[in-house]
Image (cartoon, rainbow, N blue to C red):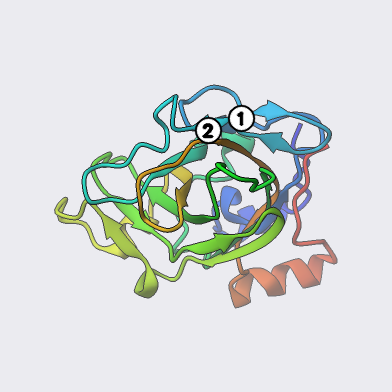
Amino acid sequence: MIKFAVAAVLAASGTALAQVPFTETFDTDSAGFEDGPGNPAAFNAGAITSQTVDNANGFFAPFPGSPAFATVFRTDTATSGGAFSGNFFANDIRQITFDITVNNSFGPGEIGPFGLFVRLRNDVLATGLTTDSVTLNPGFNQVTLGLDPAFLSQSNPGAGETNVEILQNIEAIQFTAFQIPFASPTAGNVSFTLDNVAIGVPAPGAAGLLALAGLAATRRRR
């Protein structure tokens, strides 16, 4: 169950409850997160792990002229009790941070290193917003990605929506890894472990309400 102590305060302010800054710590389960193919992510000791990804199962097979990539985690409107959906723009959600571990020894013949970006979309499946990418090193990585609409790029643009309009109704988020360099994948396999997924930078009004209430602006699942 998700405990949400600030609900009454923010309901009075008119702020959408799902968009209060929070951290998903995976204390007890996978919180509705899925792996790339859409299966429940594997819960393991307070974190979640993607399925093993390799060239043999096709998840790193690139489109012609594109990098070898794979979506390794997904969220939707049910994830973490709806915490990853809603109006990111109005509620000043401007970053996403998370811990991610590359479960790969990077030995001879193994794929890697990797880049990673996050893609957000609304109910228009054909388009979405993509963050800048970061490089994932072997082992543990702490990642922060900006969600400012001015610096997000549209994937498959052409649906006639602006970046702001997409951010006003986020329904799904994808965490996508890609092979560096952008080349055909080599032999080997990898999985990723995800933990402490946090969204949000509180708007001045919401931060003031939280301070007056004497409440933490972090939401944890127990």
Disc 1 versus disc 2: nearer the observer: 2
Residue at x-position 28% and y-position 59%: 154
From the viewer's side, name the closer residue of 118 and 17. 118
Of all residues, the one furthest to the front in this rendering is 108
Q: Is residue 89 above or below residue 6?
A: below
Q: Is residue 123 above or below residue 21?
A: above
Q: Is residue 86 visible?
A: no
- Residue 105 appears anywhere in the view: yes
Mark 1 nearby-residue class (10 Å; few <14, some 14–19, many ≥20): some
Q: Amino acid at mark 1?
A: Gly
Number of residues whose C-alpha sits closer than 10 Å to that of mark 2, classed few (under 14), some (14–19) or many (20 or more): many
Q: Are marks 1 and 2 in contact (CB under 8 Å)?
A: no
Q: Position of residue 184 (x, y in %)?
A: 35, 45
Q: Amino acid at mark 2?
A: Val
**Residue at left offset 62%, top offset 69%:** 202
197, 139: nearer the viewer: 139
Q: Position of residue 150 (x, y in %)?
A: 36, 75
| Percent of width and height locating residue 220 | 78, 46
Which dot marks residue 57? none
**What is the spatial separation of the Cα atoms under label 1 and label 2, in whole angstroms?**
20 Å
From the viewer's perspective, is 120 left or right of 13? Answer: left
Name which of mark 1 and mark 2 comes first in the sequence: 1
**Image quarter of the N terminus:** top right
Tell me what residue is drawn at x 70 percent, y 75 percent: 208
**Is 86 situated left or right of 162 in this image?**
right
Residue bearing mark 1:
32
Q: Residue at x 76, y 57 (%)?
A: 218
Q: Which residue is mark 2?
A: 53
